[in-house]
Structures are given as C-alpha cells and as structure tokens.
Image (cartoon, grey):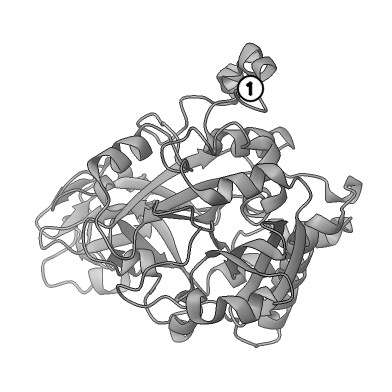
Amino acid sequence: MLRPEINDLLCRTGPGTPMGDLFRRYWQPVLLAEELPENDCPPVRVKVLSERLIAFRDTEGRYGLVDEFCAHRGVSMWFGRNEQGGLRCPYHGWKYDVTGQAVEVPSEPENSNFCANVKLKSYPVVKRGDVLFAYLGDPAAQPPEPEWEAYTVPEGQVFTSKRLQECNWLQALEGGIDSSHVTFLHGGNIDTDPLFKGSKGNLYNKRDLKPYFEVVDYEGGLLIGARRNAEEGYYYWRVTPWVLPNFTMVPPRGDHPVHGHFWVPIDDENCWAWTFDYHPTRKLTEDEIAAMRAGFGVHSANDEAYRPLANKDNDYLMDREAQRRGETYSGIAGIALQDSSLQESMGPVVDRTKERLVATDAGIIKARQKLRKAAEALQRGIEPVGNRPQDQRVRSVAIVLPADQSFVDGVGDAMIAEPSKPHTTV
C-alpha cells in the first residue's frame, strides 16, 4: 500500500508538480497524424498534462502546438481561421504562427512593434510514423527526438490508435506491466482474437495460472519477466520492457505484429491510451489493419472523439451470458475494453492506501519506486533516463529457455531493436 502523499505525487502531472515536471522531460504522443491531415486544415484541441492547447498545421505543412487562448481577450483559438501561414482569432483578427508568435494585430499601426512582444506559449512538434509527438518541457533540457522502433520502421509496418480512458494514467500503466491478469481477464481472447491466435505461447498461458515474476533493472526503466512452465526442463518467458515514464510493450505472439502503449495523462482523472502495432520485418496486412480498426488485439472501436463505443455509460456492453459460457472471462468483448473497464472501475484516482499487493505485483511495486525516485531526483537537478535513443531501442520478447538459465542471460540481444531484425517470439 502507498501513503496518500506518495499516491498523489505519482498521479498528479499538472504544471509545477514533481511528476508533471518529470513527464515534461519526454516527447509525448499528442495527436494522430490523421487529426491534422492537410495544410491549413481546422485546428484541433489538445489537452495534455492538464494544459489546454491548440494544434494546427500551417500553409507550409509546419505543425504548431500553442496555448489555446488568444493573448488579447482569452478567446479559444479552436474557433480560429487557419490561413496563410498562421491561425487567426475570429474575435479581433490577431494572428499567430506555429511558434505562437503574433504576426498580425489589425488594430495596431503597420509600423508598430506590438506583435514582437506578443507570443503564446508554444511547444515543438515532430511527426514520427503516423503520430505527432510534442515536448512540453524546458527547452534547455530537450532530449533527442523519439526513436521508438515502431516509429522508425518503413511505411506500412505500423498502425497506431488512441482511446480515451477515464481514469488516472498510473492505473492504466500498471495494467500494462501486469502480465498475471492475462490468463484470467483475457483468457477467452488469446485463442480467438485474430491478432493473438495461433501462437504456441497461448498454450503455456492457459496451462500455467501461477506465473513467477522476476523484475530486473534496465537502464531506461525495468524488464519484467513472467515465467510459466513449458515442456519438462524448460520455462516460457514473456519479457515486458517498461521505459520511464509511460512506455510499455507487450511480448509478441507468433508472427503477429508487436503491441505497445504510451499512457499519456490528459489531466489527473483521464488519460489517452495510445496503442501501436508494428512488425519489424514486413508490412502489416490488410486483414491485420482491418482487425485493429475493428477493435481486435489491444485496440478498441471508437467514436469520432476517440472514446470507445463500449464505455462506462453503457456498462461496456457487458454480456453476462457470454461470461457464463466462458467466452469472455469478464463478459466484456475485446482486450482493450476488458482492461480499461476494470481500471476505470477503480475510480478516477484509485486509493492505493487500501490495496494488498502480492508477489506477482513486483513489477508494479518497482515501477512506482522508480517513478518516485526519478521525480524527486529531478527536483534536485538530476536529469531522468528513458528519453535517450539507447533507452528507446528496446523490444519485448517471448522465449522458451532451459529451466536453469536466467531470462536476462537467455534473451541476450533479442531485447535490442535493430532494423529488419526478426523479433524473438513463440
């Protein structure tokens, strides 16, 4: 269990909070590229880390992420006209470029230097694959641009979705590093879901309901090994990397694409569950992409605002008869919604003073410790890890090893992402 003040430290990510300062040392996904599909398209509201912002794409294709509110009278720039290299407020015509700099104030004389002294808060944005990443921190501490393998593979080898999750980011992250629930909560899916079925690892998952966990330090975070019995004298290991503060990757199954997540705080009671699927050596098939769009694998079917169609307002379309028949363990269809429904059921911010943790929660315990230490160290001027290229060139692994071999020794360089190298899978 956690003391209330520690729970607050880990969960609160707004401006000026220790965890908020930590998050602001990393590039975070903020929009799908499809949300700003062309030059001079309509602007988009973005709320991240409790900051209200506006994203737009100008006439030259440059991306901007600026304070939502006009410096003049506080009008939301979502109503702005995206035109001729800038976003113009419809109230009095003030116009801003992608850096937030005012470039036109119609009421002021042409020879005035008024514009030079008006600038909205703005943040840099880069496009990687099908995602726009933003950096919201101190410009002097800006890390290299993101190098996650999913966003460095050739075009056609990655698909990304996002869904609104109506709970604190840490509840979602902790689900991402908890492999012990897979056999129960997702037990009805691993043999039927088109993005999971056919893997021999599924048999090991179903046959051994009591995985053993081993958690080891990794330079960018943790490696969480879940061990299950395989053939005599062998163990089946599923190794999940967690990279500070909010990146997780699901171990692969057969030749299916590899899944992963970023859990990005919107505010203290909501987050975006960013989900990617990529394959390091081939393009995704049309059937795979269709399945992802339909809500299979770790994706969900969403409305136009990226809120799942099955949500808390309709009890996630829970089917008690399917639960009774054993088709789904929880009565809820889809792995993504099975996770988010239970995480949302804890409330907006779970009270961790009441929890009772067990041995299989070792990864969660160590992740909390690392997050706390990193946030507190940053307050003392010590920069965090996880935002360097070497931290991001990491893979998840599924592997069968001799019983007398540690998973760290056994996986070797299989955890290291390299272009065109097949992933290690069962």
Q: Quadrant of residue 325?
A: top right
x, y (%) of residue 76?
Answer: 36, 44
Answer above or below: position of 96 versus 244.
Answer: above
- Between residues 204 and 57, which one lies in front from this camera angle? 204
Answer above or below: position of 91 versus 174.
Answer: above
Task: Mark yes or no: residue 195 visible.
Answer: yes
x, y (%) of residue 353?
Answer: 89, 50
Residue at image location 31% in from the left, 43% down from the top: 78
The number of discs equals: 1
The answer to whether residue 59 is left or right of residue 262 is left
- Between residues 293 and 235, which one lies in front from this camera angle? 235
Residue at image location 23% in from the left, 65% down from the top: 154
Q: In which quarter of the image is residue 360?
A: bottom right
x, y (%) of residue 290?
Answer: 29, 36
Task: Mark yes or no: residue 168 visible.
Answer: no
The answer to whether residue 326 is left or right of residue 283 is right
x, y (%) of residue 77?
Answer: 32, 47
Q: What residue type is labelled 1?
A: Gly
- Between residues 307 and 367, which one lies in front from this camera angle? 367
Residues packed near mark 1 inside 10 Å, few (<14), some (14 to 19) or many (20 plus): many
Residue at image location 90% in from the left, 46% down from the top: 354
Q: What quarter of the picture does the N terminus occupy?
A: bottom right
Mark 1 — residue? 331
Residue at image location 60% in from the left, 23% down from the top: 327
Badge 1 element: loop
